[in-house]
């Protein structure tokens, strides 16, 4: 691939949230531009007026921003470029590479029925396409024409896809594409070509559902005398049931992953690996990816979405995330549950203590919640650990905890003292009892560190409850 003046783009249609496949394409486009010191453009393809919404635009912008896939140019909205598309259409009509077609939907249906009856492919029969020696009927009154591209009638379209390798399609397989609809709105294949041309895009990364569109687009570039970008079509992402990841099959938006406690760098890391590799590297930062992502080692075959692997990747990034950043994320998770946790310093200490055992910030919030809301251990834990043997020791300890300095070291010393005074009681009996009463569960990290996270008064009152 050329390394000079790389310009890539992501061109989502605002007809829903930013889904994972588009997020991956955005990541590849962004990383490729960054790797080469190039430019990453954001274009909003809003020509499907009936299905595009402002809400989707905002969701897309928010998702890209959260992921950190910062664009250098845009957002450019296609519906604000109608005058440009119309001008190009007029040029093409004048040059003979496009023409008005007045065929009504009824006529086209009849045409296709007849083709089917003859066992032929249903392709537009070029009835309105001007040709030497052909006399066209006068345009019918009252029919608003569409404009069609005069696609080459023979020959082969070939490109070297930088993901899939060489691809060829014969022109006789494709027909004269509508480029401007009756309502004067351009179709996807036309707008995308004018835009990629005007925005000097050099590398198009997109999903392989667009492979069938690429021959038309290449023919359009050629008809316009525009330089061709390179195309790379990434395979679909499969759901864990082996079918294409889709909303119906439980795929969720990028923002849903944010809300479910995933870190953006973890989602990027995981998405990157679904279709690309760098040796055996499984865990990396966005900066490392930018350093490595040179357009090679893109996978030709589809990868499967694996929630367990994503959770593993997220756990790694949580472990490496700064505690004060995690504190704010946990605070947000707690506030969604209606738990006010204003003490960010305590949350940061909690993050440091619990992050090694969490896959998401939701799990981190599950731990931190005990600092702010009353806890109740399950009955089985209460009856197993809150025994008569441990009761006097807990009362003794409670007394001690009332007077010591409130630090893990002093709490540890008080625990030792308690055990010494209650031989043969073991730490293995005392600590779980404390955990059940104070934390509501029998297992936690080191009990002295955990107790020190709480307000002293909270620990004393929870111990009194036994
Ligand atoms: N708007 C198209 C989509 O969302 C973009 C395809 C392309 O990148 O050319 O799939």
Image (cartoon, helix red, strand yellow):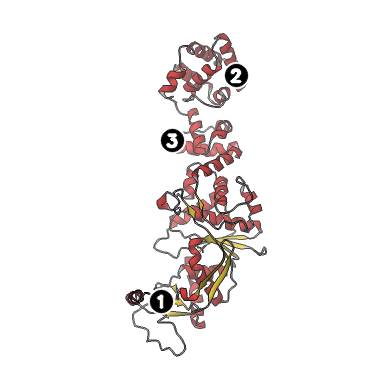
Query: Looking at the rendering, in which quadrant would you find the C terminus?
Result: top left
Q: Mark 1 points at which residue?
A: 124
Q: Mark 2 points at which residue?
A: 412
307 versus 154 height, above or below: above
**What secondary structure is found at the residue carrying circle 2?**
helix
Q: Which of marks 1 and 2 is in front?
A: 1
412 versus 102 height, above or below: above
Which label's residue is closer to the chain start, 1 or 2?
1
Residue drawn at x 51%, y 68% as measured from the top left = 214
The residue lying toward the viewer, choosing from 359 and 402, is 359
For the residues marked 1 and 3, what is the alpha-carbon distance in whole angstroms? 60 Å
The answer to whether the residue labelled 1 contacts the one labelled 2, judged by CB atoms less than 8 Å apart, is no
Which label's residue is closer to the chain start, 2 or 3?
3
- Across and down, in percent, residue 151 comes to 49, 77
Q: Name the residue under label 3.
A: 338
285 versus 346 height, above or below: below
The residue lying toward the viewer, choosing from 56 and 151, is 151
418 versus 251 height, above or below: above
- Across and down, in percent, residue 162 comes to 59, 63
For the residues marked 1 and 2, what is the alpha-carbon distance in whole angstroms? 83 Å
Badge 1 crowding class, 10 Å Cα cut-off, few under 14, some 14 to 19, many 20 or more, is some
Q: Is residue 81 visible to us here?
A: no
Furthest-bottom residue in this view: 133
């Amino acid at each position: 691939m050329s390394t000079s003046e790389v310009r890539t783009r992501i061109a989502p249609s605002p007809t829903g949230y930013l889904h994972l496949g588009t997020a991956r394409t955005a990541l590849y486009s962004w990383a490729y531009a960054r790797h080469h010191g190039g430019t990453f453009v954001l274009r909003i393809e809003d020509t499907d007026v009936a299905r595009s919404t402002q809400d989707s635009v905002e969701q897309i912008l928010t998702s890209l921003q959260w992921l950190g896939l910062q664009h250098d140019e845009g957002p450019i909205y296609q519906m604000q470029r109608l005058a440009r598309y119309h001008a190009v259409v007029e040029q093409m009509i004048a040059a003979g590479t496009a023409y008005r077609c007045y065929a009504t939907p009824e006529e086209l249906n009849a045409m296709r029925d007849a083709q089917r009856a003859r066992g032929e492919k249903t392709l537009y029969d070029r009835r309105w396409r001007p040709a030497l020696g052909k006399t066209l009927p006068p345009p019918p009154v009252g029919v608003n024409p569409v404009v069609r591209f005069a696609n080459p009638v023979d020959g082969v379209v070939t490109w070297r896809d930088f993901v899939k390798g060489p691809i060829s399609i014969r022109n006789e397989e494709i027909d004269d594409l509508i480029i401007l609809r009756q309502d004067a709105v351009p179709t996807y294949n036309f707008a995308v070509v004018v835009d990629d041309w005007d925005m000097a895009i050099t590398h198009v990364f997109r999903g392989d559902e667009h492979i069938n569109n690429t021959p038309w687009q290449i023919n359009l570039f050629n008809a316009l005398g525009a330089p061709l970008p390179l195309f790379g079509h990434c395979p679909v992402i499969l759901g864990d049931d082996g079918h294409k990841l889709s909303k119906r099959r439980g795929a969720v938006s990028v923002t849903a992953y944010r809300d479910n406690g995933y870190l953006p760098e973890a989602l990027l890391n995981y998405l990157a690996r679904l279709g690309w590799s760098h040796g055996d590297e499984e865990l990396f930062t966005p900066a490392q990816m930018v350093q490595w992502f040179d357009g090679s080692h893109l996978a030709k075959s589809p990868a499967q979405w694996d929630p367990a692997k994503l959770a593993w990747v997220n756990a790694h990034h949580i472990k490496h995330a700064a505690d004060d950043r995690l504190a704010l994320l946990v605070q947000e998770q707690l506030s969604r549950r209606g738990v006010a946790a204003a003490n960010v310093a305590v949350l940061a200490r909690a993050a440091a203590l619990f992050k090694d055992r969490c896959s998401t910030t939701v799990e981190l919030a599950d731990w931190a919640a005990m600092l702010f809301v009353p806890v109740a251990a399950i009955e089985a834990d209460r009856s197993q650990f809150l025994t008569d043997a441990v009761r006097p020791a807990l009362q003794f300890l409670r007394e001690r905890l009332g007077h010591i300095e409130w630090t893990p070291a002093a709490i540890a010393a008080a625990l030792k003292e308690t055990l010494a005074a209650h031989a043969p009681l073991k730490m293995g009996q005392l600590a779980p009892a404390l955990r059940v009463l104070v934390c509501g569960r029998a297992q936690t990290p080191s009990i002295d560190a955990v107790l020190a996270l709480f307000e002293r008064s909270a620990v004393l009152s929870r111990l009194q409850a036994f």
